[in-house]
Image (cartoon, rainbow, N blue to C red):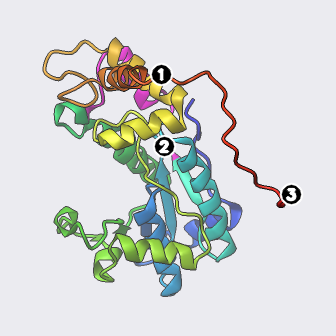
Amino acid sequence: MTPFAEREAAPVAAQRIRSERNHAQMIVASFGGGVNSTAMLIGMHERGERVDLILFADTGGEKPHTYAHVLDMSEWLVNHGMPAIVTVSQQAETLESDCLKRKALPGIAYGFKSCSDHFKLRPQQKYLKAHGIVPTVKLIGFDASEPQRAKPVEGNRYPLIEWDWGREECAEAIDRAGITQPGKSSCFFCPSSTKPEIMLLRRQYPDLADRAVAMEKNAELTVVKGLGRRFAWGDLYAADDAQANLFPESHIEIDCCCYDGEPA
């Protein structure tokens, strides 16, 4: 099971879905759990624009702060008269377990988007089909700094680009709403992670960093060296450890003479 098994929207949201299903437009938002999609929903609320259904596709590999944010954001939405977030997933397996079983890395490590297609897009499509929902409008949270990602597909709408909201404007909207900044949303083993993000993962969630390295070691690799494509995360962590060992900690306790109380 994934950390978020598929669950129905809150009763009020489910009722809205049923009541709106036969209307001329069914507006569905894809919620990624990060800054952009959070700001997009806040902006829709600020403008009084309708959203009928909000879907979050759980790969099973999001970081803990993202799962916490999904719950907090869903509560905020319901409190502001919007639908709760519905979490969907490939219930049979997670992206991590799929990679381990196939002795491979996520598709994006090889230049393919199969991981996103199988574990992000398909669960949402399956949910819509199962509930007889044909979205007329799909809300997608690409911001104004990435217009090249906004493909001219019929029915797709990119509100952040319409509003000329870049990353800064998105962060400001989240602050206005009184919501904690969500941080980056991605699988903890995402091959698109930068080196600083890879090192941050180890500091924040060492157990997840270990699992990422275990996936890497389990994979039968020929065309890439590891999760970093041209390098292995395990080698990066080992190099960091080796560098730290060049400067061992001193075990001699010396009084620094600092005093944080009242003057004697």
Q: Is residue 69 above or below residue 89?
A: below
Q: Name the residue under label 2.
A: 58
Q: Residues within 10 Å of mark 2 (few under 14, many from 20)?
A: many
Q: Mark 3 points at which residue?
A: 264
The magenta stretch spans which residues?
88-107
| Residue at the image point whose x is 82% and y is 60% from the top | 263
Of all residues, the one furthest to the bottom in this rendering is: 47
**Residue 248, label in figure:** 1
Quick one: 176 or 61, which is closer to the camera?
176
| Residue at the image point whose x is 61% and y is 69% from the top | 77
Which quadrant holds residue 140? bottom left
- The residues bearing labels 3 and 1 have C-alpha atoms spaced at a distance of 36 Å
**Is 88 left, or right, of 100 in this rendering?**
right
Foreground label between 3 and 1: 3
User: What type is the residue that disc 3 sits on?
Assistant: Ala
- The residues bearing labels 2 and 3 have C-alpha atoms spaced at a distance of 59 Å
Label 3–label 1 contact, CB within 8 A: no
